[in-house]
Image (spheres, helix red, strand yellow):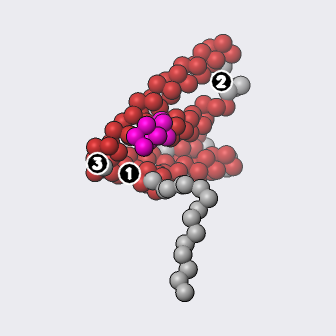
């Protein structure tokens, strides 16, 4: 008697982008933990802060290759996701800048340290919207 695989209660499909982003996110977490816990000189802090950059370069190179290999429909979905994410990111950055001017400093807005996560969230939101359009 063969056991059939039970369907999952959620419909998560790991995308190529999430798989490729793993090394970049891990190096960013490593860098953030080091910067947050160790008392380092300014020069060493700058080097540790740049640790995620090569991993991000690798991610970008591989992701562009992935996008170029997609069929036309999936390329269109990716383009539409970026077309949604970019203006949302600009609006958030503009709002944060205005709030910093109004506050006369950045001490009250630690969101700037995590700004890149909002860009990713906006892209994912755009991707969901674009994907639903082509179902």
**The one of 135 and 93 positioned closer to us in this rendering:** 135
Q: How many marks?
A: 3
Depth-wise, is mark 1 or mark 3 nearer the camera?
3
First along the sequence among labels 1 and 2:
1
Q: Which numbered tag is attached to residue 58?
A: 1
CA gap, disc 2 and disc 3: 44 Å
Residue 108's place in the image compared with 98, above or below, is below
The crowding category of the residue bearing disc 1, from other C-alpha atoms within 10 Å (few below 14, some 14 to 19, many at least 20), is: some
The crowding category of the residue bearing disc 2, from other C-alpha atoms within 10 Å (few below 14, some 14 to 19, many at least 20), is: some
Q: What element does badge 1 sit on? A: helix
Residue 14's place in the image compared with 99, above or below, is below
CA gap, disc 1 and disc 2: 32 Å
User: Could you tell me which residue is drawn at 59 percent across and 62 percent down?
Assistant: 8
Depth-wise, is mark 2 or mark 3 nearer the camera?
3
Report the magenta stretch's main SS: helix
Q: Which numbered tag is attached to residue 106?
A: 2
Work out which residue is located at the far right of the displayed protein and give it: 108
Work out which residue is located at the far front of the displayed protein and give it: 1
**The one of 15 and 105 positioned closer to us in this rendering:** 15
Q: Is residue 74 something one can see in this rendering?
A: yes
Residue range highlighted in magenta: 126-135
The crowding category of the residue bearing disc 3, from other C-alpha atoms within 10 Å (few below 14, some 14 to 19, many at least 20), is: few
In the visual, does 60 lie left or right of 104? left
Q: Quadrant of the N terminus?
A: bottom right
Q: Position of residue 30 (x, y in %)?
A: 58, 53
Residue 106, by quadrant, is: top right
CA gap, disc 1 and disc 3: 22 Å
Q: Position of residue 58 (x, y in %)?
A: 38, 51
Q: Position of residue 120 (x, y in %)?
A: 51, 39
Residue of label 3: 71
């Amino acid at each position: 008697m063969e056991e059939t695989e039970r369907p999952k209660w959620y419909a998560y499909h790991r995308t190529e982008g999430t798989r490729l982003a793993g090394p970049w996110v891990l190096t960013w977490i490593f860098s953030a933990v080091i910067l947050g816990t160790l008392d380092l000189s300014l020069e060493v802090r700058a080097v540790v802060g740049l640790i995620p950059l090569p991993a991000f370069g690798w991610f970008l190179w591989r992701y562009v290759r992935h996008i170029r290999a997609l069929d036309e429909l999936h390329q269109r979905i990716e383009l539409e996701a970026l077309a949604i994410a970019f203006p949302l990111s600009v609006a958030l950055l503009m709002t944060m800048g205005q709030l910093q001017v109004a506050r006369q400093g950045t001490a009250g807005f630690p969101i700037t340290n995590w700004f890149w996560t909002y860009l990713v969230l906006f892209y994912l939101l755009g991707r969901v919207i674009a994907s639903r359009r082509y179902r």
